[in-house]
Amino acid sequence: MRKIWDIHGGIHPPENKSQSTQTPIGLIDLPDEIILPLNQHVGTPADPIVNIGDSVKKGQVIAEAHGFVSLPVHASTSGEITAIEDRLIPHPSGMSARCIVLKPDMQDEWVALTPIDDFRTKKPGALAELIRNAGIAGMGGAGFPTAVKIQPRGDQRIDTLILNGTECEPYITADDMLMREKAAEVIRGAELLAFILGEPANIIIGIEDNKPEAIAAMSDAAKNAKVEIVSFPTKYPSGGEKQLIQILTGKEVPSGKLPADIGIVLQNIGTAYAAHRAITYGEPLISRVTTIVGESLNIQRNIEVLIGTPMSHVLEQHGFEHDQCARLIVGGPMMGYTMEHLHAPIVKTTNCLLAPTKAELPAPAAQQPCIRCGMCSEACPASLLPQQLFWFSQSEDFDRLHTHNLFDCIECGACAYVCPSNIPLVQYYRASKGAIRQHDEEKRKAEHSRQRFEFRKERIERAAAEKEAQREARKKAAAAARQKQAENAESAAATATPKPETTSPDKTAAKLERALSSAMSRLERAQKQVADALETDDTARTDTLQARLKQAELKVDDAKKRLDAFKQNNSDAKAGVNTIEEQNSASEKLEQSIVQLEKRLATAQQKLAEAVNSGLPTISALEQGVAKIRDKLKNAKEELANINNPETDTSASTDELKSAEAAISKAQTRAAELANMNPADKAVAKIVSLEKRLDKARERLSAAEANNDENLEVFRASVVTLEKKLADAKAKN
Amino acid sequence: MEVVLNSPIILALVALGILAAGFGAVLGFAAVKFKVEGDPLVEQIDAILPQTQCGQCGYPGCRPYAEAIANGDAINKCPPGGHTTIQELANLLDMPAPELDEEHGEESDVKTVAYIREDECIGCTKCIQACPVDAILGAAKQMHTVIASECTGCDLCVDPCPVDCIDMLPLESGPADWHWDLPKPVNIIATDRDSVPPNDEGAAA
């Protein structure tokens, strides 16, 4: 005989179990509709694998498990899928969830099953997988997937398997009746679970001593098995997982740990039975034994009901009198919850439907203030301080609730049962547990958001810093470029400034000439623009353009003056130099001047060619210039020949040198003249362009006269001005 | 030396002086060795705030508000956190918990999440720039969408939207998120109560 321990607290409410144990487990007619919620277990909902309109057989998988802690859903009977939609589910929230709706075809035709005669020929892991595929969840009420529970982690050595036949809650007799009628199969299920768990040393079936028939039947069935049937005094809530472990083994499951952590696995009787059927017959979990009880029913009994059968159908089959019923409770009177609607289905965890009359189970009395009597803590099976928890719960003091181990509360309701002030203590604890879970979830989410926010901030800062760095780099590069440019300019200036002295005067002259020509071209452009403006009669523009023209003219004059002045100086300087340097260098000078003259000749010829090509009016002038340069070149060459002649004496050569020098200076002044010839060219060009414009203006005037244009006067005036300008230009020329 | 040894008072003073120097050295070492970087109070306050980063408190995010609280700002400026957050802050800072300052918004029981009506989105990316937690996905001239699981419901994206295609929808909740509510407060005045006869077997349902 095994030693029995006691638990702290506990209560002895009226059992009310005899009403439903008078008749054997019954069966009811098939309903018109089967509603199968996708989440009848703890964990993630299953994924539907059928479509609306599909025909399914009894036991066929219609939704697959999604993840490790999840279970498939099977069709409870054969028929047609009519909907996959949100339907009311048995849940204290009264909310809806996704369900598969099946219309039975009344054939109740099984899908092909694969029974296993001897489970010992299979591997435990394979058996656990079969149990999972059969959709078996803990049938005591919590609905934790059985396959997960019977496959403990590697570090958990299981030495005890306990089957829970306690059924301590009033009214419920489903396990009692199952043990009475299917004792052998329950024992077989226990052996199966023990095999999967690796044959733990102890296999205990715990049954409260208020079920003598069940104890007798089970003891009888367990005669040849290595299973121990243990009965112990009736007390609520001995059937709690941790409480039963303490009663049968004397061990306490530490707060926040699982029984597996101390080497114990606990399963419900019904779960063992379902596991046995799943392996031996290959039947998935599609039905369960449920107690249908309450004074508002004509028949009170246990039935084996198909999962998904609407509660309304079940109640109807038992002569339900709606107006008599105070409320419909799913589960027992202590831990169950009230359903507002009757359309929710029976699910894998529905062990009892309680439909009491008002006299049988009156509404809870009005709550009164706590008088700190301490009866609740005496009743608490988890050795908590319900009264303290109540205060903390009211003030939503989550920290203190944690330190007072709120989460060890099994919500058995013993405290509320004994409370003389009728305080619904468990409701406070449930609310606080929910609030704390939500709060923790929010904290977790907040932490996540904070990380994302900080990451974003960091990213933005990094991007800004990168941009700043790029801007800085660009700035530096620009500064370096500027500096380099300045250095180049400086060195250019350093090497260039002395140049004017070293460069030949001709180069400077050329430069000045270039400046002059560019000034002149600007002048021409300005003139043209003024003419255009006059033509289009844009007075405002004409004024500015004329101002610009004036400026250009001034610049041209300036450039001319500078060129003249330079030429003058240059010839003076050359003359001086020549007298100082005497004759010995004369031949060199002459050679140089010949080279220069040749160069000039080449450029003059080029200019001439260009002029000829573009048909400019300066051709004649340029031809003259070229001819002159040629003459000079010829003279210079002759002189050079004279100087180099050895027969000529120095005195004679000196004279000749002088004449040569004179020739050179003459040539240079000629060059200056050539440059000075530009104004004449300009005048010619001006006359030509004026003539053209005059023609155009006259044409337009005649056109305007023909059309009687309103701008006639303007055109006439512009023709007059142009005529005048042309006359002036011709006179100047 | 002899004077010191012979005079108990001076001896005691010297002994105390040595002790003081010793402890001073230990404390000085500890102050350097175990120096806490930053303000730990700000971290604690920040951990309590709901991290919606909504800016309803008037600060650009939860952390700046945490810093402001550490510097003495009021603790009742956080509508998303509501009463619970104020309570926690009051506990942490050891001060009485004030009511929520309605100036900064009202506490809402319904959690919301932003939803972009995708046919109307023109892909301007303005909401993406406004989102403090990068919960909006999209690119220029591409349709945007909200990653609902990352959205804090701060509604900062609603205003910048030039075509008003963002709605704040209540977060869908199923049976998994549901939890029991606290029972209604007690009517302690006898005449306010329903005249229900007390029942010995009154069980909690």
Image (cartoon, rainbow, N blue to C red):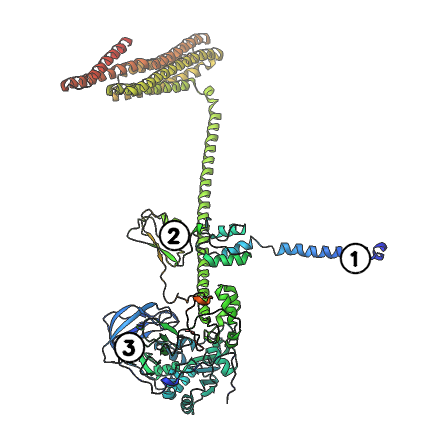
The disc at residue B155 is 2
**Are labels 2 and 3 assigned to the same chain?**
no
Name the N-terminal-most of marks 1 and 2.
1
Residue A597 visible here: yes
Decide which of A379, A321 is in the foreground and name it. Answer: A321
With A410 as the anchor, is A74 left or right in this view? left
User: Up-down: is A65 above or below A547?
Assistant: below
Q: Quadrant of residue A596?
A: top left
Mark 3: amino acid: His
Horizontal and vertical percent position of residue B68: 51, 50
Query: Which of the two discs, 1 and 3, sits closer to the camera?
Result: 3
Give the residue number, with chain letter if any, for mark 3.
A313
The disc at residue A715 is none
Q: Chain of mark 2?
A: B
Query: Which of the two discs, 2 and 3, sits closer to the camera?
Result: 3
User: Up-down: is A202 above or below A403?
Assistant: below
Query: Where the C terminus of chain A falls, by quadrant?
Result: top left
Give the residue number, with chain letter if any, for mark 1.
B12
Q: Check disc 1 and report its element: helix, strand or loop.
A: helix
With A381 as the anchor, is A680 left or right in this view? left
Residue A598 visible here: no
Mark 1: amino acid: Ala
Horizontal and vertical percent position of residue A679: 32, 14
Horizontal and vertical percent position of residue B128: 37, 50
Decide which of A70, B56 is in the foreground and name it. Answer: B56
- Alpha carbon of mark 2 to alpha carbon of mark 3: how far? 47 Å
Q: Check disc 3 and report its element: helix, strand or loop.
A: helix
Q: Chain of mark 3?
A: A
- Alpha carbon of mark 1 to alpha carbon of mark 3: how far? 95 Å
Q: Quadrant of residue A648?
A: top left
User: Up-down: is B107 above or below A609?
Assistant: below
